[in-house]
Structures are given as C-alpha cells and as structure tokens.
Amino acid sequence: MMEETYPLAQVADILSIPKAILHKWEKNGKLIPSLNSRTGEKEYTKTQLEVFEPARAMYNTQWDKEQKISPVKTYNGIELFAGAGGLALGLEKAGMHSLMLNEIDKQA
C-alpha cells in the first residue's frame, strides 16, 4: 500500500506559507519533495511532514480530547448587525446563546 502523499499546493495551504517558501526549502535541502511518476507533480509524504518541525504540530495534536471539552458556563452574545444570519448560526453551532439579534430588514 502506498504512503499518503500531499501535493505542493496543499502542503503550502496546510502550513499557511507561500509556495515559494516550499521551493526555497527544496533548494536548500530543508524539505525535499518526491516526484509523482504518474502525474509528474511534486508531492510530500506524510512521514516527511511528521518529522518536519513546522508541520509536526499538525500531526501531534490532542484534537480528539479537545473536541470533548465543554464549557463550564453558558456564553451569551448580542449581534448588532445580524445580516443574513451566518455569524449567528456559526456562533450557535459553537455553543453560544444569542440574547439579541438586530436586523433592519424584516425578511432577513
């Protein structure tokens, strides 16, 4: 079974860096991608990224534990410019309780 790989553009997005930085790291030997023989694109293996310091934190997270944490109290908010409700819905899904949502348009 082949190891999981990530294309150059995806690694740049994951690390929140420009692609030019990945090219620079490749030139100075800091992080060297392999060439996909099928597509001809540069890609990085999961193993490479797990041992590479800037990407290591992404793999060594406590995400499963953190998702199980619940707040000790209810958080309330007032939204002064409710708009179409996108922010209010997001905050509600995050566990916040809306005390008031202000909107001029009755249809919104």
Image (cartoon, rainbow, N blue to C red):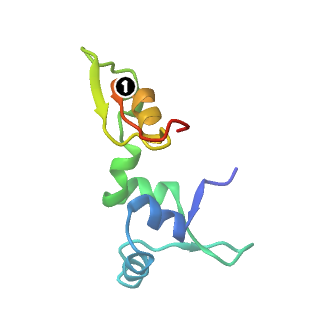
Residue visible at 66% across and 72% down in the picture? 36
**Disc 1 residue crowd, few under 14, some 14–19, many 20+, Cα 10 Å:** few
Q: Amino acid at mark 1?
A: Lys
* Image quadrant in which you'd find residue 76: top left
**Is residue 56 shown above or below 39?**
above
The residue furthest left is 72
**Residue 84 horizontal side relative to residue 97, left or right:** right
* Image quadrant in which you'd find residue 107: top right
Residue visible at 38% across and 48% down in the picture? 58
Residue 74 locus on image (x, y percent):
28, 16
Residue placed most toward the observer, 43 or 15: 15
Disc 1 target residue:
65
The residue furthest right is 38
Residue 84 locus on image (x, y percent):
50, 42
Badge 1 element: helix
Residue placed most toward the observer, 104 or 81: 104
Residue placed most toward the observer, 98 or 94: 98
Residue visible at 61% across and 54% down in the picture? 3
Residue 93 locus on image (x, y percent):
45, 28
Residue visible at 59% across and 59% down in the picture? 5
